Image: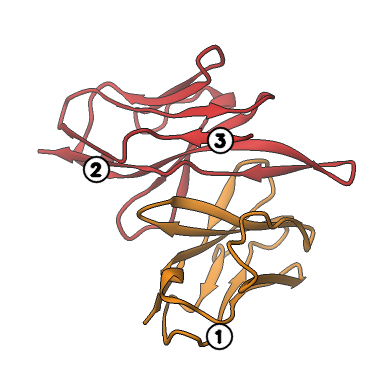
Chain colours: A red, B orange
Amino acid sequence: AQRVTQPEKLLSVFKGAPVELKCNYSYSGSPELFWYVQYSRQRLQLLLRHISRESIKGFTADLNKGETSFHLKKPFAQEEDSAMYYCAPYFSANAGGTSYGKLTFGQGTILTVHP
Amino acid sequence: DAGVIQSPRHEVTEMGQEVTLRCKPISGHDYLFWYRQTMMRGLELLIYFNNNVPIDDSGMPEDRFSAKMPNASFSTLKIQPSEPRDSAVYFCASSLAPGRAFFGQGTRLTVV
């Protein structure tokens, strides 16, 4: 079965400290993986995608197929990084012989960066 | 483009009443998703459509929940009858590129 797990519901760090938000998935195929972020009073929005191997706002995420993980990392956290973060695997699903995309989300991790 | 538009932003209703949540996706997007967000369960996928056709409704919790997409620019999520445990924030999202979803601001539903 397709499943995504974010083991930490809450994560607190001090400004300038490294931060790592964990994400593990289970899937028989190779999903595309995304991280979404929801800042206070803002819409949920895409942060980054694994296929682009990009760094957004100092965050990076590496797909580890062996460990089926896609952890989000930032070397020096900032107060403005405080938000809810969701790991989101995009699974291909077949229905009636046609392939469709199914975007699911983990339970989310609330990151608080203290001054 | 104003993005994904949801209405109402807040809804307070009494147990047993019918609730209808509305969504206008971004023009041209062929996927539409309905999610429910709670502290306990995070963001759950309820149902999604492709080109107005429901593809997977396995996340719909009960028969009390139903969703329709009569055309490419409108979708509804209906709860009838509503119960207090349905209280949550309901999000609609649309996408064109796989995985790159654009979310509405959500509807905060409170059932008393």
Mark 1 residue type: Glu
Tell me the residue that label 3 is attached to: A3
Quarter of the image with the N terminus of chain A is top right
Q: CA distance from mark 1 to mark 3?
A: 32 Å
- Density class for disc 3 (Cα within 10 Å; few <14, some 14-19, many ≥20) is few
Residue drawn at the location 64% of the way across and 62% of the way down: B26
Which of the two discs, 2 and 3, labels the residue nearer the N terminus? 3
Where residue B11 appears, as percent x and y from the top left, is 43, 80
Q: Is residue A88 left or right of residue B69?
A: left
| Chain letter belonging to callout 1 | B
Q: Which mark is residue B109?
A: none
Give the camera-side residue of A36 and A108: A108
Q: CA distance from mark 2 to mark 1?
A: 40 Å
Give the camera-side residue of A41 and B65: B65
Mark 2 residue type: Glu
Does B64 appear above or below A40?
A: below
Q: Secondary structure at mark 1?
A: loop
- Density class for disc 1 (Cα within 10 Å; few <14, some 14-19, many ≥20) is some
Residue drawn at the location 61% of the way across and 74% of the way down: B64
Between label 2 and label 1, give the one nearer the viewer.
1
Tell me the residue that label 1 is attached to: B18
